[in-house]
Image: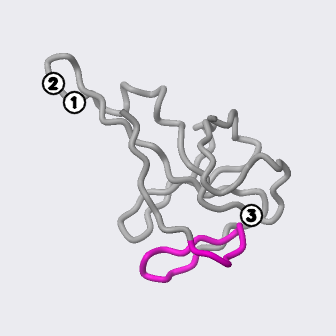
Amino acid sequence: MNTMPEHKEEEGLPDSTFQLPDKTIIEIMHDRILIEPSFSSSKSKSGLAIPDSINKEEQNQGKVVAFGSKKVSDKLEKGVSIIYRDRAVDNIKIKDKHYIIIKEDDVLAILK
């Protein structure tokens, strides 16, 4: 089962920005995309947890939170779920939450 972390959308902010619950604002630059990754909580039939390192196919999915002003595709919007190439991700942790920043070229598909 995929579970997406939830965040509160702030009205009136540009698409290149994201506001954390403590009011910290993150502004994404150029052609970069800020993603909330989806995490799987996979278990075997006997109830043992399967580590994410084994369950690779679900590790490169997430939800677009914000994107830079140089975004090219009109299909990429806040809240869209995507599959991205995991070779060039920048993992960041802000206020104990995990995010990923990628280039727009590393978006492989949009999930509908």
Q: CA distance from mark 1 to mark 3?
A: 37 Å
Whether pointer 2 and pointer 3 mark residues with C-beta atoms closer than 8 Å, the reply is no
Q: Residue 105's x, y, as percent? A: 76, 43
Sequence-first disc among 2 and 3: 2
Residue, disc 3? 68
Q: Quadrant of residue 51?
A: top left
Which one is nearer the viewer's eye here, 84 or 11? 11
The quarter of the image holding the N terminus is: top left
Whether pointer 1 and pointer 3 mark residues with C-beta atoms closer than 8 Å, the reply is no
Q: Is residue 13 above or below residue 86?
A: below
Check disc 2 and give the amino acid type.
Answer: Gly
Q: Residue 39's x, y, as percent? A: 40, 41
Whether pointer 2 and pointer 1 mark residues with C-beta atoms closer than 8 Å, the reply is no
Per the rendered image, the range of residues in magenta is 10-25
Q: Which residue is painted at 37% across and 36% down in the image? A: 40
Q: Residue 48's x, y, as percent? A: 17, 26
Magenta stretch containing residue 17, yes or no?
yes
Residue, disc 2? 47
Nearest to the eye among marks 2 and 1: give it. 2
Task: Farthest residue to the bottom: give it.
Answer: 23
Which one is nearer the viewer's eye here, 44 or 29? 44
Task: Say which mark, if any, is on residue 49.
Answer: 1
Task: Farthest residue to the left: give it.
Answer: 46
Check disc 3 and give the amino acid type.
Answer: Gly
Q: CA distance from mark 2 to mark 3?
A: 42 Å
**Element at label 3:** loop
Q: Residue 43's x, y, as percent? A: 24, 26
Q: Which residue is painted at 65% across and 72% down in the image? A: 17
**Element at label 1:** loop
Mark 3 is surrounded, within 10 Å at the Cα level, by few (under 14), some (14 to 19) or many (20 or more) other residues, namely: many
Q: Which residue is painted at 57% across and 79% down in the image? A: 25
